[in-house]
Image: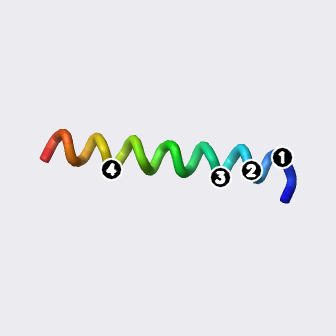
Amino acid sequence: MDVKGMKALLLKLDFMQRFTRGKHVVA
C-alpha cells in the first residue's frame, strides 16, 4: 500500500473513533 493510502486510512479510522466517541458523549 502507498503512503497516501495509509495516511487516508489512519485519518478515516481516527475520524470514525472521534465520531463514535462524540455520539456516546451526546447520548
Residue 16's label in the rendered image is: none
Q: Are marks 4 and 3 in contact (CB under 8 Å)?
A: no
Label 4 SS = helix
The residues bearing labels 4 and 2 have C-alpha atoms spaced at a distance of 21 Å
The quarter of the image holding the N terminus is bottom right
For disc 1, the marked residue is: 3
Which amino acid does the dot numbered 1 rest on? Val
The residue lying at 24 percent from left, 47 percent from top is 23
Q: Disc 2 to disc 3, how far (Cα)?
A: 5 Å
Query: Residue at (19%, 40%) from the top-left corner?
Result: 25
User: What amino acid is labelled 4 in the image?
Assistant: Thr
Contact between labelled residues 3 and 2, with CB atoms less than 8 Å apart:
yes
Q: Secondary structure at mark 3?
A: helix
User: What element does badge 2 sit on?
Assistant: helix
Q: Position of residue 19 (x, y in %)?
A: 36, 45
Which residue lies under the disc numbered 3?
9
Query: Which badge, 4 or 3, is on the more N-terminal residue?
Result: 3
**Alpha carbon separation for disc pair 2 and 1:** 5 Å
Disc 4 target residue: 20
Of the residues shown, which amino acid type is indicated by label 2? Met
Query: Where is mark 2, residue-wise?
Result: 6
Q: Earlier in the sequence, mark 3 or mark 1?
A: 1
Label 1, secondary structure: give it. Answer: helix
Are there few (<14), some (14-19), or many (20+) residues within 10 Å of tag 4?
few
- Which sits earlier in the primary sequence, circle 1 or circle 4? 1
The mark tally for this picture is: 4
Q: Residues within 10 Å of mark 2 (few under 14, many from 20)?
A: few
Mark 1 surroundings: few (<14), some (14-19) or many (≥20) residues within 10 A: few
